[in-house]
Amino acid sequence: MSTSGVADPLAWLTSLEGVGSAYAATRDGIDVMLRDRGLRRTSPETTAESLLRGAHASAVLEGSSATLAEVRENGGDAIARDAVRLSTELLALVPTLKRAPLQALARLHAVAATGSVAADELGRPRDAGSAQRLRALADLLVAPTQAPALVVAALVHADLVTAAPFASHNGIVARAAERLVLVARGVDEKSLVVPEAGHLALRAEYESNLRGYRDGGRAGVHAWLLYGAEAFAAGAEASPLRRAAE
């Protein structure tokens, strides 16, 4: 994906049938939830709980068998510990994502994959093609656009999963990047929505739509975006503002 010569490289996404209305409805629902439930009761502990739930869900999607209770008690298995470690550093990367997105994406992988891959592979693309995909994605993240932030987040997520630019942990990195975009672009500044849990709740659709994004051309992108609006709504329902601690 290139931004050269294009005034708004993401405008075509919102022109796809049903995408604009689906994301407007989802954003309205998120805004209502955060406004009605969050402003009076939000605390750092609530944000930490959201990040923990998200890390657990992301780890399960990556193959972890740890339960949320196990993650709370002892960190769970290796995949869960990697996801939790990344979640604890995630919000500190908001300024970096805004200023130097390529650096932020590299840091996501370096944190998640520490101890799992060689030091010279941390944060580095697998090959020249992966490096090009990462640069193109970073260009999109700094390009002026009228596309909703939720759409941008969904696109970043799918592109990172399907390009698999790093030596490991691409799914965990992609889901963390999605959450980071929601914070950086003002959708969910306190990171109270749990998009990873939304994807886990819709796991079959999540995995099939990622395959469609990878292999299905424009139709696959369209289907992924429609799925994404549903998943973000499910992520809002999974917020600790709405659900008692498990």
Image (cartoon, rainbow, N blue to C red):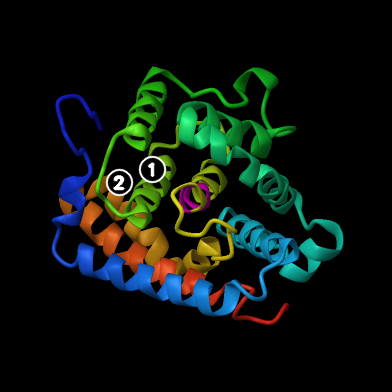
Horizontal side of 243 relative to 186 (left or right) equals right
Amino acid, disc 1 = Thr
Question: Contact, CB < 8 Å: mark 2 with mark 1?
Answer: yes
Give the residue at x 45% y 76%. Answer: 32
- Local crowd at mark 1 within 10 Å, few (<14), some, or many (≥20)? some
Q: Quick one: which residue is furthest to the right in this view?
A: 74
Q: Nearer the viewer, residue 33 or 195?
A: 33
Q: What is the spatial separation of the Cα atoms under label 2 and label 1, in whole angstroms?
A: 6 Å
Where disc 1 sits, the SS reads: helix
Please tell me whether residue 46 belongs to the stretch shown in magenta.
no
Q: Is residue 81 above or below residue 95?
A: below
The image's mark for residue 162 is 1
Magenta segment boundaries in residue numbering: 178-182
Q: Earlier in the sequence, mark 2 or mark 1?
A: 1
Q: Which residue is mark 2?
A: 214
Quadrant of residue 90 in the image?
A: top right
Q: Position of residue 87 (x, y in %)?
A: 67, 49
Q: Nearer the viewer, residue 95 or 67?
A: 95
Horizontal side of 121 relative to 23 (left or right) equals right
The image's mark for residue 109 is none
Most common secondary structure along the magenta stretch: helix
Amino acid, disc 2 = Arg
Q: Position of residue 134 (x, y in %)?
A: 40, 29
Give the residue at x 29% y 68%. Answer: 24
Give the residue at x 75% y 32%. Answer: 115
Please tell me whether residue 180 belongs to the stretch shown in magenta.
yes
Q: Position of residue 70 (x, y in %)?
A: 80, 66
- Picture quarter with the C terminus: bottom right
